[in-house]
Image (cartoon, helix red, strand yellow):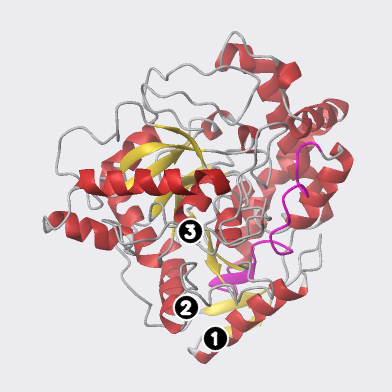
């Protein structure tokens, strides 16, 4: 297909507003939730041929929370990622290995999501069981990046990222087991906060694992939308073991100690990525923050252990699919990445006790980073978004795995340790594709991440895909 920039912004009820602005318009009765939902559905239809981000629309129209005060984001249209149960809708996990039936219950996080007032128009596509870093499939058409349709929107929340970046909705659900909020945010020029483990209602998939890697969140085009979502979600459920977050509304008022990391022990960052991170460091210094070089205490052994645990997840999917997903589950129909990870784990399953022991110890090493720093600044990914096909599950497994390890060289640390991390738009690459920068903090310190994000956005507002110069 033609390599182009695609968006759905137009003169309709949604306009160019973010979620906070739309919720204000609903409260003022200047627009109705039904008008917003209709506009979003029309926009989704407009971009489907080019981007393919939607798994399916909600049967019977938008899904909302039971009657109540409506929530802070009441009436704003959104989508759930297709790996979270919502009663009456199937959950396919992006896989062709089974035929999903409508869920009988709504997952705890989906209730929290609806409790913010968001209206769910449907579900978004993800790669099979969220295991890949690109939203591509063995046979089905891929999800494409709105900024450049020849390239990947990232994963596993690639469908959600494409919808938000293209202007279909201002906010959409994402979740993150190895970078799957932050990777598509980086690829699509969005804001993506992976919260501290336990900040939101626990994810059904992650809570069954020996180490819970998975946290839920959202993808947005503005920092205030992310902040508003987490404040609204906290009103639905707050974890007393973590400091309360509340509504963060702007930059902080104190200097922050920032450790700068440009390269991973696993990969040297490419030039656009390096430039984006270094320019962000310069901007933060100009704001009065102290930036000094730092080193991540996670190298080749951590990467091997994470890959082994990744394989363990694929092994569990393949061996328990009939029991947990559907009696008709067929492991033989899993894609090349899932199958390869499963086989790789099976060959080295004897390493599992040591893998789990070392990964659990990583939390202490992560905490040690914040004895001398408040925040770590790094890339989200080691290189810019790859073209469609580079991370296809049809690539030979050993080659695909190496490509993934060299690409996803930063984000898994936060999943293993449970620490919060936020992806923000940095300086764009020369070809116009977004490049993300990453801020990490100690457990429970999402506030400092959001305050820095507000400061960076105010200093240099994010590029807008609908602007004629956005590709520059």
Q: Residue furthest front?
A: 2
Tag 1 or tag 3, which sits nearer the N-term? 3
Element carrying mark 1? helix
Q: Residue 390: x and y, percent?
A: 78, 50
Q: Residue furthest left?
A: 29
> Which circle marks residue 7 in the picture?
3
Closer to the eye: label 3 or 2: 3
Q: Residue 89: x and y, percent?
A: 41, 24
Callout 3: few (<14), some (14-19), or many (20+) C-alpha neighbours within 10 Å?
many
Q: Residue 306: x and y, percent?
A: 74, 44
Q: CA distance from mark 3 to mark 1?
A: 29 Å
> Which circle marks residue 456 in the picture?
2
Query: Does residue 238 lie above or below 138 as drawn?
Result: below
Q: Are marks 1 and 2 in contact (CB under 8 Å)?
A: yes
Residue highlighted by disc 1:
283
Q: Residue furthest top?
A: 327
* Magenta-span inclusion, residue 231: no
Q: Are marks 3 and 2 in contact (CB under 8 Å)?
A: no
Residue 201 is left or right of residue 329, and the answer is left
The magenta span reads 370-394
Element carrying mark 2? helix
Q: CA distance from mark 1 to mark 2?
A: 8 Å
What is the quadrant of the C terminus in the image?
bottom right
Asked whether residue 239 appears in the rendered view, the answer is no
Q: CA distance from mark 3 to mark 2?
A: 24 Å
Asked whether residue 115 appears in the rendered view, the answer is yes
Tag count = 3
Callout 2: few (<14), some (14-19), or many (20+) C-alpha neighbours within 10 Å?
many
């Amino acid at each position: 297909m033609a390599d182009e920039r695609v968006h759905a912004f137009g003169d309709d009820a949604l306009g160019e507003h973010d979620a906070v602005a739309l919720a204000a318009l609903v409260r003022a009765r200047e627009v109705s939730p039904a008008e917003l939902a209709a506009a979003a559905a029309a926009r989704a239809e407009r971009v489907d041929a080019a981007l393919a981000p939607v798994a399916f629309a909600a049967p019977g129209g938008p899904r909302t929370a039971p009657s109540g005060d409506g929530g802070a984001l009441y009436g704003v249209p959104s989508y759930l990622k297709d790996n979270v149960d919502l009663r009456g809708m199937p959950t396919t996990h992006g896989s062709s290995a089974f035929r999903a039936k409508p869920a009988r219950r709504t997952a705890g996080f989906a209730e929290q999501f609806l409790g913010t007032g968001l209206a769910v128009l449907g579900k978004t596509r993800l790669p099979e069981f969220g295991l890949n870093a690109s939203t591509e499939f063995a046979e089905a058409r891929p999800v494409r990046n709105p900024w450049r349709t020849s390239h990947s929107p990232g994963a596993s929340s690639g469908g959600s990222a494409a919808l938000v970046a293209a202007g279909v909705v201002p906010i959409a659900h994402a979740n993150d087991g190895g970078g799957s909020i932050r990777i598509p945010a980086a690829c699509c020029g969005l804001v993506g906060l992976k919260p501290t483990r336990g900040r939101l209602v626990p994810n059904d998939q992650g809570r069954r694992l020996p180490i819970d890697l998975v946290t839920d969140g959202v993808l947005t085009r503005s920092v205030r939308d992310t902040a508003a979502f987490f404040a609204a979600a906290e009103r639905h459920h707050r974890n007393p073991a973590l400091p309360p977050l509340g509504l963060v509304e702007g930059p902080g008022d104190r200097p922050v100690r920032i450790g700068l990391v440009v390269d991973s022990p696993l990969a040297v960052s490419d030039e656009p990525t390096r430039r984006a991170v270094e320019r962000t460091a310069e901007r933060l210094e100009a704001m009065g923050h102290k930036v000094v070089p730092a080193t991540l205490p996670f190298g080749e052994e951590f990467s091997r252990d994470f890959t082994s645990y990744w394989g363990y997840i694929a092994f569990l999917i393949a061996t328990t699919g009939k029991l947990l997903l559907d009696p008709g589950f067929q492991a033989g129909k899993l894609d090349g990445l899932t199958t390869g990870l499963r086989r790789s784990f099976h060959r080295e399953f004897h390493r599992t006790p040591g893998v789990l022991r070392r990964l659990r110890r990583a939390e202490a090493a992560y905490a040690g980073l914040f004895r001398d720093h408040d925040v770590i600044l790094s890339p989200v990914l080691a290189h810019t978004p790859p073209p469609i096909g580079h991370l296809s599950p049809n690539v030979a497994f050993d080659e695909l795995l190496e490509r993934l390890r060299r690409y996803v060289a930063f984000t898994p640390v936060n999943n293993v340790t449970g620490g919060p991390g936020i992806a923000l738009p940095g300086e764009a690459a020369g070809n116009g594709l977004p490049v993300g920068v990453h801020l990490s903090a100690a457990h429970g310190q999402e506030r400092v991440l959001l305050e820095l994000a507000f400061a960076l956005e105010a200093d240099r507002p994010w590029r807008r895909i609908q602007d004629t110069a956005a590709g520059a």
